[in-house]
Image (spheres, rainbow, N blue to C red):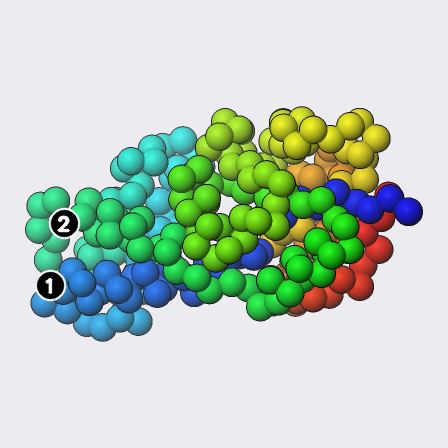
Amino acid sequence: MTLAPLFFDLDHTLWDFETNSRLALEQGFKDLGLASLGVADLPTWIRHYEAANDHCWAEFRAGRMDKATLRGRRFELALEACGAACPVGFPGQMGEHYLAHSPCQKTLIPGTLEVLETLRARGHRMWVLTNGFDEVQHLKMDNCNLTPFFEGVYTSDALEVKKPNPQAYRLAAERAGLTAAEFKYVVMVGDSLESDVLGAQQVGWRGVHFAPAGERHPEAWRTIQSLPELLDLELKA
Ligand SMILES: [Mg+2]
């Protein structure tokens, strides 16, 4: 029996991005005195930040905003939307606070450690393939003790290509040292239908869609609503 090599996405799949981001925003709300600038309360701040952040990432993906601009701009837009004061240099300072605090949060998606322990005990070889900034993704994984489960962590930052570009999966497999035979048996697990399932399936991998809200896409090889369901799948060649 040949076990499938496993590739995992990180954000929203193992690392609870949404909860951790909100914890970092809460810390910033207090540390940087947002109430005194006129932000009504924490839920209002989180709501406007998340909307501004989505907008900035859409601009980034469209090539209309660079990484350095995005980091401060999302806070500037959120302050504006809250009707709060925005002192010169403040969005940059908030961006730095967020970047310093967010990767230090330790909330994992339920079942993460138990599932990884079990898969490792069964003998699976595992890697992470994530669209994200290199330093940030490594920091998150180290802080949550995820790093030892994986033979390698490949970020779009380091690979210089993002999922779902087919080159991202091929480069990751090449760096992992997978043979052409092993390449065909890879299973990729992630929350993004486009990046973790369809993109992976395009190069011949099998995609497991982690869909905690319960959505179903028949194109995915398999769909799971919770991580422990992964342990019931046939993850073999
Ligand atoms: Mg994800």
Badge 2 marks a residue whose secondary structure is: helix
- The reply to whether callout 1 and callout 2 are in contact (CB within 8 Å) is yes
Badge 1 marks a residue whose secondary structure is: helix
Q: Nearer the viewer, residue 212 or 216?
A: 212
Amino acid beneath label 2: Phe
Q: Tell me the residue at 29%/36% (across/down).
A: 68
Which numbered tag is attached to residue 90? 2
> Percent from the top left, x then y, of residue 26?
28, 66
> Percent from the top left, x then y, of residue 216?
71, 61
Q: Is residue 176 left or right of residue 89?
A: right
Q: Tell me the residue at 25%/56% (across/down).
A: 78
Task: Answer above or below: position of 140 versus 28.
Answer: above
For label 1, the residue is: 37
Q: Nearer the viewer, residue 87 or 139?
A: 139
Question: Is residue 150 shown to the viewer in this render?
Answer: yes
- Which of the 4 image quadrants contains residue 122? bottom right
Question: Is residue 76 shown to the viewer in this render?
Answer: no
Q: Is residue 62 left or right of residue 14?
A: left
- Which of the 4 image quadrants contains residue 34? bottom left
Which numbered tag is attached to residue 189? none
Q: Nearer the viewer, residue 112 or 34?
A: 112
